[in-house]
Structure formats: structure tokens, C-alpha cells
Image (tube, helix red, strand yellow):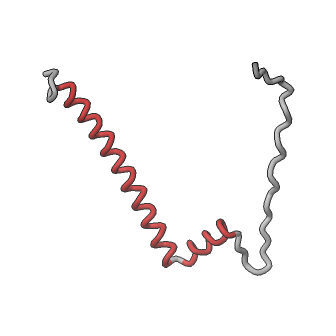
């Protein structure tokens, strides 16, 4: 019951197996999403255009891209640092 092949070990291994199976399921779903995205990027002109616009900031003629400036840095808090 409590030995090397007992119920305690069995339950631990079963829990570990369920955890690993859910991880495999999640990774398979993620992989499927990547496959679908690759297929659309190979064949769908709208998907290609979307990626070019987002990642490379491409525009069509007479279009403008407005880029917001970085936010200003936060002012110091006024607290003294205690390095002792």
C-alpha cells in the first residue's frame, strides 16, 4: 500500500500524468493555431498586408502612420535610499 508501487505513488503519478496531458493538449492547440496562421500568411493577401502594416509599418500611397511618443519618465519619489 505504501511501498514503491503503493497507492500514494500511484496517485502522485496519476496527478503528474494528468498535468502532463493537459500541457500536451495546450501545446497541440497552440501548434494548430501556428499552422493556421502560417497557411493564411502563405495564401491570404489580407493576412500578409495586416502583418506588413503591423510589424513593418508599411502604408499605402497617401497614408500616414502616426507614432505616439514614449511617455515621460516618472518623477523621483523623494524618498531617500538607505544603503546601510
* 63 lies above or below 81: below
Q: Residue furthest front?
A: 84
**Image quadrant in which the N terminus is located:** top left
State left or right for residue 9 relative to residue 50. Answer: left
Q: Looking at the rendering, in which quadrant would you find the C terminus?
A: top right
Rendered position, 45 above or below 2 = below
Q: Residue at x 80, y 57 (%)?
A: 68
Residue 76 at x, y = what percent? 85, 33
Residue drawn at x 64%, y 72% as measured from the top left: 52
Q: Is residue 61 left or right of residue 28?
A: right
Percent position of residue 54, x then y = 66, 66
Image x and y of residue 15, in percent = 28, 34
Residue 60 location, quadrant: bottom right
Along the viewing direction, whichever of 82 and 32 lies nearer the viewer? 82
Is 29 left, or right, of 8 in this rendering?
Answer: right
Count of marks overlaid on the render: 0
Considering only vertical position in the picture, is 59 above or below 21?
below
Q: Position of residue 42 (x, y in %)?
A: 49, 77
Quarter assignment of residue 75 = top right
**Residue 50 vs residue 36: left or right?**
right
Identify the residue at image location x=49%, y=72%.
40
Q: Residue furthest bottom?
A: 61
Q: Foreground residue, 4 or 31?
A: 4
Relative vertical location of residue 73 with respect to residue 58 in this rendering, above or below: above
Residue at the image point whose x is 16% and y is 21% from the top: 2
Q: Quadrant of residue 36?
A: bottom left
Amino acid at each position: 500500500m505504501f511501498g514503491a508501487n503503493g497507492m500514494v505513488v500511484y496517485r502522485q503519478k496519476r496527478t503528474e500524468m494528468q498535468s502532463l496531458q493537459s500541457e500536451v493538449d495546450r501545446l497541440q492547440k497552440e501548434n494548430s493555431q501556428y499552422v493556421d496562421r502560417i497557411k493564411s500568411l502563405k495564401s491570404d493577401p489580407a493576412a500578409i498586408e495586416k502583418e506588413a502594416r503591423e510589424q513593418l509599418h508599411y502604408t499605402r500611397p497617401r497614408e500616414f502612420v502616426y507614432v505616439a511618443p514614449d511617455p515621460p519618465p516618472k518623477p523621483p519619489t523623494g524618498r531617500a535610499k538607505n544603503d546601510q
